[in-house]
Amino acid sequence: MRRLVLVFAACRLIAAAPEVSKVEPPNWWVGHSLNPVRLLIYGKDLKGATVKCAEAAVKLGQVQASAAGTYLFVEIQIQEDAKPGAYSLQITTPDGTATAPFELLAPLPRHGRFQGFSPDDVIYLAMPDRFANGDPSNDDPLVSRGLFDRRKARYYHGGDFQGIINHLPYLKELGVTALWLTPVYDNVNHLNEREKYEGEAITDYHGYGAVDFYGVEEHFGDLALLKKLVDAAHTLGLKVIQDQVANHTGPYHPWAADPPTPTWFNGTVENHLANTWQIWTLADPRAPASLQKSTIEGWFLNILPDLNQNDPLTAQYLIQNTLWWIASTGIDGIRQDTLPYVPRTFWHDWMRAIKREYPDFRVVGEMWDEDPALVAFFQGGRAKFDGVDSGVDALFDFPLFGAIRRVFAHNAAAEELAKVLAHDRLYTKPNLLVTFLGLHDTARFMNEKAVRVDDLKLAFTFLITTRGIPMIYYGDEIGMTGGTDPDNRRDFPGGWPEDARNAFDSAGRTPEQQAIFEHVQKLMRLRRKLEPLRRGSTLDLIADKQVYAFARVSGNVAPLVIFNLAADPATVVVETSELPIPPRIVVGNQVGNSQSARSWHDELGIAPDAQWQDGKFMVQMPARSAAIYSVGR
Ligand SMILES: [Ca+2]
Ligand SMILES: [Ca+2]
Ligand SMILES: [Ca+2]
């Protein structure tokens, strides 16, 4: 033992030249609004380094090494006349010199990129590992052997970018317009032993435990293929939304053992708070400070190292990382994970940096709570009681999700939908909420007790006709089943060559799957055709136990959407004379016919023609049915 110590001490005496192993970001763009850029250089013996760049186009600013000499922060100012190309920084200590490579790129052409998303879109959420396997050669990569097993719900299943590229035409055929993929960051290359279920270690196939924010998971592909995916999607008119995580890293991120600054994380692996999930305290002016602190600074599952966005170096790293992905790939939006567990002051700065460079870009945040007041608190557009405006465009509509499940799957009163929507007064922009029937963190709709296919179809009709930006979780369009995580993340049937059925193709779907698919497809066409379903304001007409009827009003047109959720047929009468809009715009834009009896057709082809006479709009709705009445034909 004594001998070892002596040898070690001797090694330390030998002067060690600095070493560079990694530079983040590896490149930046000329003419970018974020400038200067602060590089995080990884290596060894970087303490006391001076940094030079031979090119006048890159001017050096502040240099700061970590105490252990394993990181060097270097601020660089990119001059206006800088040309794209390879650059390098010379890092010198009294013991030697190392080179840190860096590249300047010309920005991607803006046309057809960085488009944002809006109620004109319908989003489709897919998990790259579970959608389709387009490249069996990356199923069990050399660097991460043994994590692939389709029989295990928490192992990699082989899905990848190529599988998604191959099935973009399927998404086009379905009629969605944007694709949200769960995170594609590089995950750890061995089993995750820190997170076990029933004694079994898991893999981080889901992507929410990154070990490299600048890397791409090798099971999915690489950065070049991701860019190809984004380009291919854009060519088909599909937008791409990237899933990002700024709250935490995976447990095996190298920073966990050696953080770049002492305050990089909230606490350390040995000594940290656990997240207590008390989101309500964040919107409460008089909440116990200790509860707020554990909610913002606590480690997710008590496992995931919690990044400290109040450290300016951490904050800048995260902002640059976001902009790097956008500029590298040309994506159109971001879904931000675990939004409430990060200070809103950070989101404010982060959003500002995004919008400065990409004014049309949009972000939807995951704020999982069914209280609309709490969800609204995190939407940007207005400073809240603490003077902070998060700037975040959109949030997931978890309150409406809860009501959708209760009403359509559990026979709760139809009026519950209207009661949730009544809280729209709290949001700065309710039309930007992302609405959904389920997602990768909830049990599937078809998993609800005693639920029927017709219930799912009704729920879809509501989702596509109510306000907001609808989102479809992969496989719900064919009625996939599955309980809570990980059962809700089964492989899409037909995504693997060995699958018995291929539900990407109508010939491979069961009659039931085909019926749901066609219904969703029809709804997508109607949403495209009827502009008020996307952009109209919502006017509730009837909200009672069994019937919910509303108009989507836009300019001169207002389609009527009617639900009869009773087990029996019902006569639904809308008193158009009591509406605050002229009767003629309720069901059409044909002026002059408002007093004559006319028939109107259900765009879904389910309910009979409606009669409109003496100021009354009347329809015999079949049991458990929905109808959309628009301009008469
Ligand atoms: Ca594969
Ligand atoms: Ca990996
Ligand atoms: Ca946090």
Image: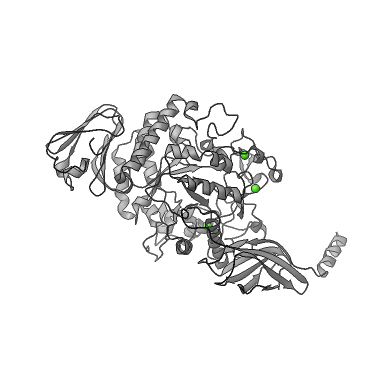
In the image, residue 289 sits, relative to residue 563, either above or below, namely: below
Q: Which is nearer the eye, 241 or 196?
A: 241
Query: What residue is drawn where x is 59% and y is 47%?
Result: 225
In this rendered view, identify the residue nearer to me: 411 or 214: 214
> What color scheme is it?
one colour
> Between 571 and 270, which is closer to the camera in this rendering?
571
Residue at screen point 24% across, 44% down: 558
In this orientation, does residue 32 appear?
A: yes
Counting from the top left corner in percent of width and height, residue 154 is at 60, 39
Circle count: 0
Vertical position of residue 396 compared to residue 513: above or below = below
Q: Residue 385 at what x, y percent from top left?
A: 37, 64
The N terminus lies in quadrant? bottom right
Q: In which quarter of the image is the C terminus?
A: top left
| Residue 557 coordinates in the image, percent (x, y) | 24, 45
Confirm whether residue 419 shows in the render.
Answer: no
**Above or below — where is 117 with respect to 488?**
below
Which image quadrant for residue 10? Answer: bottom right
Residue placed farthest to the right in the image?
3
Residue 416: image quadrant is top left
Residue at far top of view:
511
User: Is residue 65 toward the left or the right of residue 510 in the image?
Assistant: right
Give me the residue at 41% from left, 64% from top: 388
Q: Is residue 302 left or right of residue 619?
A: right
Residue 172: image location, x then y, percent: 45, 40
